[in-house]
């Protein structure tokens, strides 16, 4: 595409080429897709400029002038057909596609990054939950309680102690019913401390599940026991110990 052809493309878009020059330009454009694309761009630009101009009210005499010339035969009965540029080969859309592709890739990468960030956040939350669960489990201690004197009873029980929170629970389904003035009292034995800590009491007729609530903060728990005491409980065991069991750390 020569400089003259570029100039003719602009003149063609403006409608300033003579008929022969316009015909020659159309032939050149049919052979040169870039020249045809350039002329089309010029025409599109002129259309935008025309639409961007502020509308002007035509003078009142314009209509009469047009009608007069039409009556005098100066306006042809059939207007010339608009000049149509030759079709542009598909090389032009390919060039436009090269510009669009990077933006499409950027959008895809942005979406992929967002998904990856979301999955990373989910995995981090799951990891934190697993670590917290592991820490919770590591603070749990289980004690399986059996009769203090083997062969004297078939009663059993179990206690789960949470050393991190300082609370626990005791369960048993085999303890016999006591007299109305008696209760089963729970005791916690600390390591290196022979004195048990009162940790609540319960009545089997009201249920076989009770909370382990020591009357004071306890250190490392070594064992859990159950004794029969008078109603209201005692600060130290006075009745017979029916169940006892050492605790084991789950971790």
Image (tube, grey):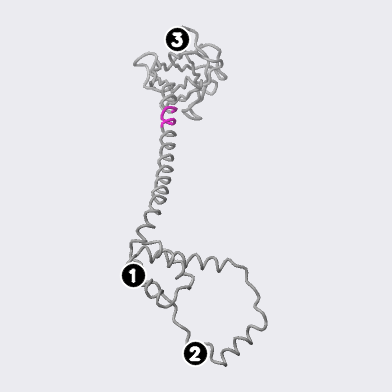
Q: Which residue is mark 2?
A: 77
- Residues at badges 1 and 3 in contact (C-beta under 8 Å)? no
Q: Which residue is mark 3?
A: 191
Q: Position of residue 225 (x, y in %)?
A: 45, 16
Q: Inspect the magenta stretch and tell me whether residue 236 lies in it.
A: no
Q: Inspect the magenta stretch and tell me whether residue 131 lies in it.
A: yes
How far, Cα to Cα, is label 3 from label 2?
117 Å
How far, Cα to Cα, is label 1 from label 3?
100 Å
- In the image, taking residue 191 as reference, residue 180 lies left or right, namely right
- Which mark is on residue 30? 1
Residue at x 55%, y 21% (from the top left corner): 181
Residue at x 41%, y 43% (from the top left corner): 115
Magenta-colored span? 127-132
Main SS, magenta region, reads: helix
How far, Cα to Cα, is label 2 from label 1?
31 Å
Q: Position of residue 153 (x, y in %)?
A: 37, 19
Local crowd size for mark 2, using a 10 Å CA cut-off: few (<14), some (14–19), many (≥20): few
Residue in the foreground of this view, choosing between 189 and 94: 94
Q: Position of residue 248 (x, y in %)?
A: 38, 18
Mark 1 or mark 3: which comes first in sequence?
A: 1
């Amino acid at each position: 595409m020569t400089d003259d052809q570029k100039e003719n493309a602009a003149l063609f878009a403006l409608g300033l080429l003579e008929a022969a020059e316009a015909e020659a330009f159309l032939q050149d454009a049919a052979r040169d897709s870039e020249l045809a694309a350039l002329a089309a761009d010029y025409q599109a630009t002129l259309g935008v400029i025309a639409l961007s101009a502020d509308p002007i009210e035509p003078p009142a005499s314009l209509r009469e002038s047009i009608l007069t010339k039409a009556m005098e035969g100066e306006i042809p009965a059939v207007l010339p057909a608009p000049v149509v540029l030759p079709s542009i080969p598909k090389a032009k859309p390919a060039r436009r596609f090269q510009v669009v592709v990077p933006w499409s890739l950027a959008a895809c990468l942005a979406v992929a990054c967002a998904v990856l960030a979301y999955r990373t956040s989910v995995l981090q939350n799951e990891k934190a939950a697993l670590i917290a669960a592991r820490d919770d489990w590591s603070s749990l201690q289980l004690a399986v309680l059996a009769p203090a004197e083997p062969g004297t009873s078939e009663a059993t029980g179990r206690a789960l102690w949470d050393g991190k929170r300082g609370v626990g629970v005791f369960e048993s389904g085999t303890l016999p019913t006591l007299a109305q003035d008696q209760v089963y009292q729970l005791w916690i034995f600390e390591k290196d401390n022979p004195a048990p800590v009162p940790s609540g009491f319960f009545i089997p007729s009201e249920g076989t599940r009770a909370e382990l609530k020591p009357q004071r903060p306890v250190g490392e728990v070594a064992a859990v026991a159950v004794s029969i005491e008078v109603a209201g409980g005692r600060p130290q065991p006075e009745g017979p110990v029916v169940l006892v069991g050492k605790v084991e750390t789950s971790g």
